[in-house]
Amino acid sequence: MAEQLNILVLEDEQGAGEKLIDMIRSFAPTAKLEWKRSILEGRIFIQEHPELDLIYSDIELLDGNVFSLFEEIHPNCPLIFCTAYNQYFLDAFRTNGIAYLLKPYSREQFEESWNKYQQLFAQKERKPDFQQSLEQLKATLSQKSNSHKSTFTVKKKEGIFILRLEEVLFFQSQGDFVLAIDRAGKKHILNYTLQKLEELLDPKAFFRINRSEIIPFASIQHFSPYTKNRLAINLLASQQVLYTSNSRSPKFREWVEAH
C-alpha cells in the first residue's frame, strides 16, 4: 500500500506490544502507529481519531474486556485480534474482525492476517466490505471447529489408554502438563500446557474459568455467587467445587446462557 496507514494497537503487555509493533513496522514501515494499553485510552483515541485504517487489539486489557469498548464505539475499520484465549471467536466475528491471532503467534501467522487485510482493503478509498470480512472469518472458524479433539491418549504402566472427552469432569494445570480428572475421580496426565489444550477444545463445549482450570459444560450441576465478582461452580456426580476468576465470571455467564 502506497498511502500512509493509520493503525491503532491495543495491548497492555509490554513485550507483546513491542513484538506486535515490530511486526507491523516490518510490513508497513511508513504506517502511523499509536499504542494504547487500556480500554479508557482506546476509547479516547478512537473518538478523537475516527479515520483509522486498522486496529490490532488484545482482548483482556488492564481495565477489562475490549468487547465492552467495541459495543460502545463501532470503529469504521477492520479489527485483527491478538489474544491468548480461543473462546472469543464468536465475539470477534460479531464485530469488524477479519482475523484472530492466538498468542504466541508466529511471523507467518501474522503475515497471513496482514495479507488478508491487504486483500480486503488494499485501496484506502474503497469502503470496507465488512460482510465479506465476516464471511472469511466464519470460514476460518469452521476450519478450526473441525480440528477439535474428542479423545486423548494417556500413558499408564499397563499401556496406552484412550480418554474420551465425555469422561472428563474438568482439566487442571500442573505447570508444564495438565491433569484430566474423570468422573470417577481418577487423574490422567496430559502432556499439554493449559493454553495449548484450550486451543484443541471446542470453545462451545469447554470454558477456561480461571488461570488453571477448564471445565466442560456437561459437567456443570449449578453455580452460585461466591464473592462479589467470583462464582462457585458445583460439578455433577462429585463433591468438587471450582471457582471462576474475577475477570472470567461475566464471560462464563454469557457462555452458559448461550447454550
Image (cartoon, rainbow, N blue to C red):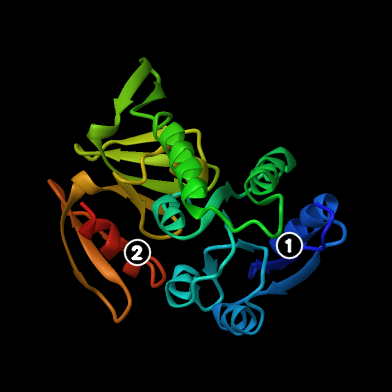
Residue 138 left/right relative to 255: right
Residue contact at pointers 1 and 2, CB within 8 angstroms: no
| SS under mark 2 | helix
Disc 2 designates what residue? 251
| SS under mark 1 | helix
The residue shown at (80%, 51%) is 1
User: Which amino acid, mark 2?
Assistant: Lys
The residue shown at (23%, 40%) is 185
Residue 34 left/right relative to 50: right
Residue 243: image location, x then y, percent:
30, 64
Residue 59: image location, x then y, percent:
52, 63
User: Which residue occupies the foreground of this view, 213 or 29?
Assistant: 29
Disc 1 designates what residue? 15
Residue 211: image location, x then y, percent:
45, 58
Residue 31 left/right relative to 216: right
The residue shown at (41%, 70%) is 247
Residue 256, quarter of picture = bottom left
The residue positioned farthest toward the right in the image shown: 29
Compared to residue 160, the image places residue 135 above or below, namely below
Nearer the viewer's eye, disc 1 or disc 2?
Answer: 2
Indicate which disc, 1 or 2, sits on the residue closer to the N terminus: 1
